[in-house]
Image: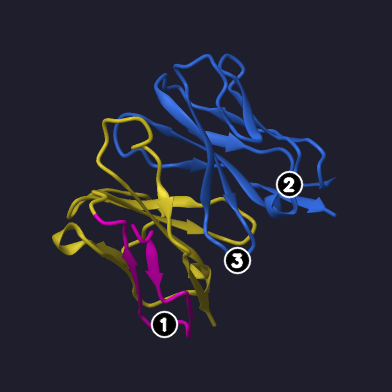
Amino acid sequence: DTGVSQDPRHKITKRGQNVTFRCDPISEHNRLYWYRQTLGQGPEFLTYFQNEAQLEKSRLLSDRFSAERPKGSFSTLEIQRTEQGDSAMYLCASRQRGGGRGTDTQYFGPGTRLTVL
Amino acid sequence: AQTVTQSQPEMSVQEAETVTLSCTYDTSENNYYLFWYKQPPSRQMILVIRQEAYKQQNATENRFSVNFQKAAKSFSLKISDSQLGDTAMYFCAFIIIQGAQKLVFGQGTRLTINP
């Protein structure tokens, strides 16, 4: 168990460019969540996957955002035509299959900090 | 609406003191779990303590304990014998057991432990 990892840790881009972030969950965790955290605020839910299926998307996730989790392993979050308002920390979390005590706990990665100039 | 309110944006105490962070939440659901997460400066979010809403007994984890008042929808965190390493942002959050089980977070409390 090496924990949740995210890449890159920091990304600076110009407005209008596309960016892609990657999240590697804890192995055998079947659920993977993406959250967005703006400065001074708590994280807000964006979307989640159960295995490879994307089961829910927040209204925060505009059509410029797309997420995938091929083969139910790592996940990618792509933002097209970035805007300054997209500047935030993007957090990934994973959790194991439910049923037992503690399986509801989400384990977070270090996040990707996006700055759009 | 499902919301979490942390009314203390910042707190500061001396090392070894006891500190209590406040949290209230709102949900119409009956089956949920509550959490306190800690986010140290430039480091990732980690779980501090969790509480099942159906349990009346307050959860404890070493120096950390909660005061869960279900009727009042209140879930405060008490840190005893505070240490410098407790300096962090603390987030209160909950999940509804059915469905996505997505975390709903408060705005956070920035806690500073002074030497």
Query: Is B54 colored magenta in this rendering?
Result: no
Position in image of residue B91 (x %, y %):
59, 44
Q: Residues within 10 Å of mark 1 (few under 14, many from 20)?
A: some
Which amino acid type is marked by label 2?
Answer: Pro
Viewer-nearest of discs 3 and 2: 3
Quadrant assignment for the C terminus of chain A: bottom right
Label 1, on which residue?
A: A16
Identify which residue, B31 or B41, lies in the foreground.
Answer: B41
**Chain B shade:** blue
Locate residue B12 relative to residue B71 in the image: left or right: right
Judge from the rendering whether residue A27 lies leftward or rightward of residue A107; answer left or right: left
Question: Mark 1 — on which chain does it sit?
Answer: A
Colour used to depict chain A in the structure image: yellow
Q: Position of residue B55 (x, y in %)?
A: 47, 16
Range of magenta residues: A1-27
The answer to whether tags 2 and 1 share a subunit is no
Q: Where B113 falls versus A4 (above or below)?
A: above
Query: Which three-letter amino acid code belongs to the residue tagged 3?
Result: Ser
Name the residue: 47% across, 74% down.
Answer: A9
Out of A105 and B25, give the one closest to the viewer: A105
Q: Which residue is mark 3?
A: B42
Q: Secondary structure at mark 3?
A: loop
Q: Which residue is depicted at the point 48% across and 50% down?
A: A44
Q: Which residue is mark 2?
A: B9
Q: CA distance from mark 3 to mark 1?
A: 27 Å
**Dot in front, 2 or 1:** 2
* Chain under callout 3: B
